[in-house]
Image (cartoon, helix red, strand yellow):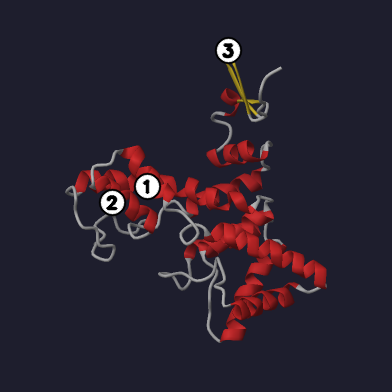
């Protein structure tokens, strides 16, 4: 009898299976996003869910040089850190106030859905109550607002894709009702940001909040790697990194 057990990946001579699927049979047949769903959930997703997963991962691939995780990675490179050290610095900077909004929004939506059921409220009434309760507690609504965007194009695309693929359910509707309730109560908009949209969709797909931030980390890793390489290739060591003193000199918008 073995001391401990695992039910994820089985390794045998010349054979690897992930939740029962031979990995060489999956290669070239499923996307990375579908593989991510499989390893986390234990089953292959239907095609529409796999496409939504892929859309989510692309949406958070990068957001320029100013996010705290990117700045942490660049600082590590500038002081002589190697690739894995710099990447670790970036990932370790994804916390409650940066990237953590996905998990926090999921918790808000799940709690709000429980409130809806307990008090027999409509989606609209629940959204209003969430905003009112946040106002009383003087708490910021997670997943809403953005320091750069007043209308985040990623949010619009995610919700549009969710509607096309059949995932525009009660959690997304509740998120929209919170957005509307805030505008009605406060007299000013607080748009759903990309983290909020991802949180709503992860709730629709049945992912627990603990994995919310993991999706942000997995999605952001390619962007961090690109910035780490650029820092090493284009900048001098031990420079003072001012997040406002930069200029984009790459390829302009293309179709």
Q: Position of residue 96 (x, y in %)?
A: 50, 59
Q: Quadrant of residue 180?
A: bottom right
User: Which one is earlier in the sequence, the residue at label 3 or at label 2?
Assistant: 3
* Residue 167 circle label: none
Decide: marks 3, 2 in contact (CB < 8 A)? no
* Residue 75 circle label: 2
Task: Say whether residue 147 is left or right of residue 109.
Answer: left
Q: Which residue is mark 3?
A: 13
Q: Position of residue 84 (x, y in %)?
A: 36, 38
Please give the name of the residue rendered at 61% of the width and 77% of the height, measured from the top-left corner.
137
Please give the name of the residue rendered at 67% of the width and 29% of the height, measured from the top-left corner.
7
Q: Which residue is mark 1?
A: 89
Task: Say whether residue 95 is left or right of residue 66.
Answer: right
- Quarter of the image containing the N terminus? top right
Q: In front: mark 1 or mark 3?
A: 1
Q: Quadrant of residue 196?
A: bottom right
């Amino acid at each position: 009898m073995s001391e401990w057990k695992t039910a994820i990946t089985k390794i045998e001579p010349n054979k690897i299976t992930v939740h029962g699927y031979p990995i060489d049979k999956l290669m070239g047949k499923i996307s990375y996003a579908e593989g991510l769903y499989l390893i986390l959930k234990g089953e292959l997703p239907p095609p529409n869910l796999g496409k939504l997963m892929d859309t989510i991962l692309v949406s958070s691939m990068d957001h320029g040089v100013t996010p705290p995780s990117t700045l942490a990675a660049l600082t590590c490179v500038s002081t002589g850190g190697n690739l894995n050290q710099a990447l670790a610095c970036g990932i370790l900077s994804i916390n409650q106030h940066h990237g953590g909004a996905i998990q926090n929004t999921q918790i808000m939506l799940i709690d709000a859905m429980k409130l809806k059921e307990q008090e027999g409220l409509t989606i609209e009434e629940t959204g209003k109550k969430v905003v009112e309760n946040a106002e009383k507690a003087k708490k910021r609504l997670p997943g809403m607002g953005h320091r750069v965007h007043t209308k985040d194009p990623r949010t619009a695309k995610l919700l549009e894709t969710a509607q096309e693929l059949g995932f525009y359910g009660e959690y997304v509707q509740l998120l929209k009702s919170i957005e509307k309730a805030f505008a009605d109560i406060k007299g000013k908009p607080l748009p759903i940001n990309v983290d909020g949209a991802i949180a709503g969709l992860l709730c629709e797909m049945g992912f627990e909040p603990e994995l919310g931030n993991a999706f942000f980390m997995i999605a952001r890793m390619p962007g961090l790697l690109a910035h780490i390489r650029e820092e090493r290739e284009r900048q001098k060591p031990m420079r003072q990194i001012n997040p406002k003193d930069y200029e984009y000199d790459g390829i302009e918008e293309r179709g």
